[in-house]
Image (cartoon, grey):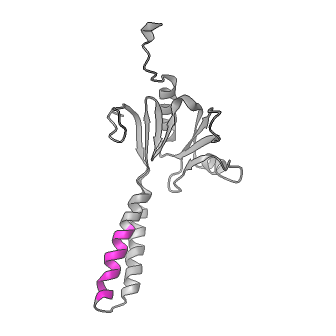
Amino acid sequence: MAASTDRDTPYRAEIAYRERLRLPWWLWASGLALAAFLAAEIWLGTSGTRAWLPFSVLLPLTTAGLWWLGRVPIRVTADELQVDDARLPLRFVAEVVALDTDGRRELLGVGADPLAFVIQRPWIGGAVQIVLNDPADPTPYWVISSREPVRLAAAIRRAGDHPQTGDNPADG
């Protein structure tokens, strides 16, 4: 993945990994079809305001809602993991595990820790578990949905192995 800059941060950081948890096309199609069906049910052949109002309200609201569900960005920079508005400094990462669909289901099932930070999208099968080693934080781990959990886990490991401290290694 090519390096680029992140406009959301006050500094320019090289992006090691980037992903957006977008909705698949079939969710867009079914969501908009359901909104059109509901608007047609409200309309039911009447005239006047009831003829156009359901379509002009429900279809844009559905589009905005579907966009909102698929807006979550994931970024790994040299020193932090950014998931939507949450930021995790990589110095607190103890372990990273890529999960398939069954692993994600097991981790988020009845044995899940209620203090875990979870960004889960049901239409995405894979996920990454990030175990933390911050004694000041009660959060034991993060679980983040990802279409490419192996690549995301590798990017977190690579970035965590080489923390950017700002120190010059030549200074000894």
Q: Is residue 101 visible?
A: yes
Position of the N terminus, as image quadrant, is top left
Identify the residue at horizontal 46%, vertical 40% (top origin). Answer: 82
Q: Is residue 57 above or below residue 74?
A: below
Q: What x and y, as percent, mark residue 104? A: 60, 48
Observer-nearest of 9 and 106: 9
Left or right: 165 as drawn, with respect to 140: left
In the rendered image, the vertical position of residue 61 relative to residue 102, given as above or below: below
Q: From which residue to which does the magenta span run?
A: 49-62
User: Residue 160 lies in magenta, yes or no?
Assistant: no
Q: Position of residue 35 (x, y in %)?
A: 40, 74
Residue sitting farthest toward the right: 111
Position in image of residue 14 (x %, y %): 36, 31
Q: Nearer the viewer, residue 9 or 28?
A: 9
From what the image shows, is residue 77 above or below residue 148?
above
Query: Residue drawn 33% across and 78% down?
Result: 55
Q: Quadrant of residue 94?
A: top right
Query: What is the count of numbered marks?
Result: 0
Q: Is residue 51 magenta?
A: yes
Instruction: Specify whether residue 25 is in view.
Output: no
Residue at position x 63%, y 35% in the image: 136
Look at the magenta stretch and give its main secondary structure: helix
Instruction: Tell me: residue 68, above or below residue 115.
Output: below
Q: Position of residue 33 (x, y in %)?
A: 39, 73
Is 131 on the left or on the right of 5, as rendered? right
